[in-house]
Image (cartoon, rainbow, N blue to C red):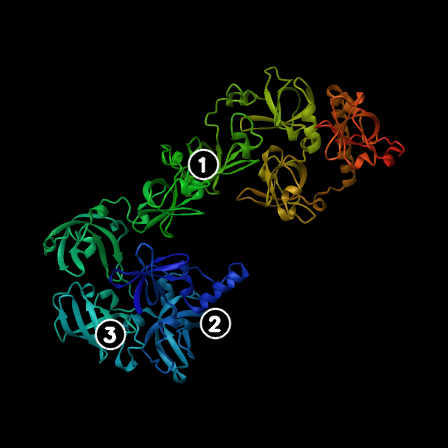
Amino acid sequence: MLLLGCIKEVNDYDLAISLPNGLSGFVPVTQISDAYSKLLTKQVAQGELLEDLNSLPELFSPGTLVRCIVTSVEKSDDGRRSVKLSIDPKKVNKGLNSTTLAVGMLLSGSVLSVEDHGYLIDIGVTGTHAFLPHEKAKNYIKAVKKGPDLKIGQNLNCLIVEVKNEGRVVCLSIDRSEVAASIATERQNWTLSNLLPGLVVKARVQKVAPLGMKLTFLSYFTGIVDFMHMDPEKSMSYSPDQVVKACVLSVHPTSRAVRLTLRPPFLHPGGAPRQLPAQRMGAVLEEATVKTFYKQFGAIFELDDGTLAFARLKHLSKTRKSFKPGAFKEGCKHKCRIIDYSLMDEMCIVSLKHQIIEAQFLQYQDIHTGDVVQGKVVSLKPIGMQVKVADGIRGLVPSLHLSDVILKQPEKKYNIGDEVKCRVLECSPGGKKLILTLKKSLVQSKLPVLSNYEDAKPGLITHGFVVCAREFGCIVKFYNDVKGLVPKNELGSEPISCPDKVFFEGQVLKVMVLKCEPQQERLLLSFRLSSKPGPEDKWKCTPKEKQEVKYQIGEIVDVKILKKKDNGLEVSILEDGDNVVAWIPMLHLSDFIATSKLQWHFLQEGDVLPRVMYLSDKGEHIILSRKSSVISAVQEEQVVRSFSEIQPGMLLTGYVRNVMPFGVFVEFPFGVTGLAPKVSMSDKFVTDTKDHFVVGQTVIAKVMSIDEEKQRVLLNLKVSECSSGDSAADSVALLNQYFKELKEIKELLRRGKPSICELVPGKRVHLVVQDVREDGSALFSGSSVKGLTITATRYHLGDKNISPGEKRKAFVLHVDALTSEVHVSLREELLKQRPKQVSMRS
C-alpha cells in the first residue's frame, strides 16, 4: 500500500512516520535507498566511518512529507501493530517505467551521487538516468539548511521538466516554487497501477455523506475523503458537482481504493502540515466542546484555542459498558487530555479516560532524570529487567541495578507482573531510552540528584554507585552517565592498599565533590565526607597544619619511623620541633621495586631514615620519597614545575602512577602527569601493559607532544628514545645505587635475622633432614639456619635416599629474604664445584 506520510521523529536508526487517520509507522535505516544501503554495508565491512555516509538526522527533518510503501505489519505481544515502511524510490515508484514518464510528473527521488554540474538522482525506474542541475536545486538547499550540497540518500520530491530518448534520460527540478505549482493532469497518463500519493489534482464532488465525500478526478478515477480530511473551514458547505483541489493520501494495490485530503497544507506539493506546540502535548483541558459524534469511530471536539481534536471510541469512556452516547451530543463539554498529535490529520488526539487524565507520564518527554516511578515487570533477561512505566513507555533496569547487591538469580526475587518502584538514571526521549534502578539506597535517597557536571559544586554530597575499583581508586557514576574519580588517598580515613577488595561494582556510597571541570567532564570525588582527621588519622594534616609546614618540594630531611602500615611508613620529620607527621609510600623507599619491598619489610618503628625528599603536599598528605633518581632530578633542576614549562623532546624522571590496558600514566615531581600510550611503552611488542611496568616504578620519559587546551601530555618510554648522551655512565650509576641499597638491607638483616646474612647462593652448609614430603621434596634444619625454612625439591635431592635425622651437606641455590626461605641442592655435580663468592640475591 502506498501512503503519504510525515516525518515525526528522526532517530539514528529509523524514521518515525505519522500516517493518515492517526496511524504511525517507521522506516528502518536500510529502507532509505539502494545507494545509502550500499554505503552502510561498506562502512560495516571496513569497520571505519565513511566520509560520504551521513546520519539520518543529517538527511531528514521532522515535518517533511514523504511517500512511503508498507513493507510489513507485525503484531506485538501486547496487541500493538507495528507498521514497517520504505521510502526507497525503487519500491515507491515501482509502477512506473521509462515509457510512462512525462513532463510535469511529480515523483520521489533519492540522491545517488554528487557530480560537477549537479546530481544523479535515483527515481527507481529501470533504464532511466535522472539528472538534477545545480540551478534547479539551490533554493531548496538553502531552505532545508542541511549543508551546501545535497547528500547521498537524501529524499526529494522531484518534478520532471524534460524527457529525452524515450524516457531513458530525464531532467528534474526540486525548485520549491515549481514543485508547489505542479498539478497532476490527464496528459501525464496516470493509471491506478502507478498513481502516487502526494499528487495534487482537480476533483469534482460526486456525493456528500455524513462521514465524508466521494470525488472523481483525472477523468476516470474515484476517491474518498473521510470526515477528518475535509477542509475545516468548508466542511459544511460542500455540494455535488463542486470542483475542489485535492491531494492523494493513499492508494491500495488490491482494492484500488484511493483516499484524498482537502486540508490546505497538503494542496501545495512540498508544503508541511501544522505542528502542535510542544507545551500542549499532555495538557489537561477542563472543557472540550463536542462538535460531532460518529458512533462507529469517535467524536470530534473543539478545544479551548479553537483547534479540533479527535477521540477514538475506546477513549470516550473507561469501558464499553459505561459508555453513554447521549453524553456526546453537539455542544456537550468534557474534561480530556491531549495524548498525541496526528501530523497527517492536523488534529490532536485526546482521551477522556480518567486513568489517562490522572496519569503521571504519557510520553518519554514527561520523564526526568531522578524521578521516582512505579512500573510493572514485563520481562527478565540476562541484561536486566524490562519495566512498563505507562502505555508506550518501557524502561530497562540493568542487571547491576536489580538490587543493592548483585543478584545471581533475579527470577527468585522478581516475577512477571510484579509492581516495582524505580528511579530514573537516564532518559533520552529522542531515542526512547529509559534506564532505571531498583537499588533502594538510590530510590530512597533524599540527597541531591547529580545529573550534569555543571551542578557538581565542591562540597556537594550525594549518592553514587561504584562502577570500577582498581589500584588507583574508584570510578563512581551518578545520573545521566555523569562519573568521577575517587583517588586512592580519598577512599577512607585509613590508607587502602587494595580498593578492589574493599569496594565492589554496583555498591552505593555517599560521596563528596572535591573539584569539577565541566568542559572537560572531569570530576574529582572523595568518600571522606568530613575534612576533620580522626583519632587514627594523625599522619594527615588539617588545612591549618598545612599552612604551618615550611618545607619546599625537593628539600632533604631526616625522618623517624612512627608506624609501619601495609603500603608505607608513617614518619615524623626530625628537624621540625612541631613533630610534623608525613608519609612515605612503600614504593618510594627506592628506585627499585624489589629493594623497596625488602626495605619496608626489615625497617622497624624507631628507625631513622636519612636523606628523604619532600615530594608533595596534596590531598592533606605530606608525601616523602627516597627514590634517588627522583631526588637527583629535582636537585639538578631537571624537572618541570608546571605544565607551561613542558616542551616536546624533554627527558624527565618520574614514576609510574597507574598501569592501564591502553597505556601507562607517569607522574613527575611538582605534580605534572602524562600518558605513555601502549605503542610508546616499549621497543618490544606490548600485549599486556602489566607485563612491562608496575605502579611505583621509576622511569625516564620523553615528552612526545602536549595539548595545552586539555592540559594533556603524551610520553614515550621506549629505551631507544629515552637514553641520554652518556647512557653507559647512567647505567653504572644505577647499578652502584642498587648495590648500595642491597648493602643497607644486609645491615638491616643482621639486626633481625643474622643467620640469613651469611647465606649466599653457592655456599655449602651442613643440615639435618627434618622431613621428606609426599611430593619427594625435603625439609631441613641446622644450627646455622635457625628461623629459616630450608627446602630441596625432588630433583635437587639427586638419586640419594634420605631419612629424617640424617646429616647432609647442601649447596645454597637461592635465598628469599622476604619470606625467609632458602632453596638448596644435594646434587653431587654442584657440591663438587669450586666455591665462588656470589653476592646475595633478593
Q: CA distance from mark 3 to mark 1?
A: 66 Å
Q: CA distance from mark 1 to mark 2?
A: 63 Å
Percent position (x, y) of residue 223?
A: 22, 73
Q: Are marks 3 and 2 in contact (CB under 8 Å)?
A: no
Percent position (x, y) of residue 564?
A: 62, 22
Q: Nearer the viewer, residue 100 or 31?
A: 31
Judged left or right of residue 43, residue 8 is: left
Q: Where is mark 1, residue-wise?
A: 405
Percent position (x, y) of residue 173?
A: 36, 73
| Mark 1: secondary structure | loop
Q: Residue at 47% of width from left, 71% of height from top?
A: 115
Three-letter code for the amino acid on which mark 1 is drawn? Val
Q: CA distance from mark 3 to mark 2?
A: 36 Å
For the C terminus, the quadrant is top right
Vertical placement of residue 206 versus 22, above or below = below
For the N terminus, the quadrant is bottom left
Q: Where is mark 3, residue-wise?
A: 201
| Mark 3: secondary structure | strand
Vertical placement of residue 329 versus 214, above or below = above
Vertical placement of residue 794 versus 575, above or below = below
| Mark 2: secondary structure | loop
Q: Residue at 14% of width from left, 60% of height from top?
A: 295
Q: Where is mark 2, residue-wise?
A: 116
Vertical placement of residue 440 versus 620, above or below = below
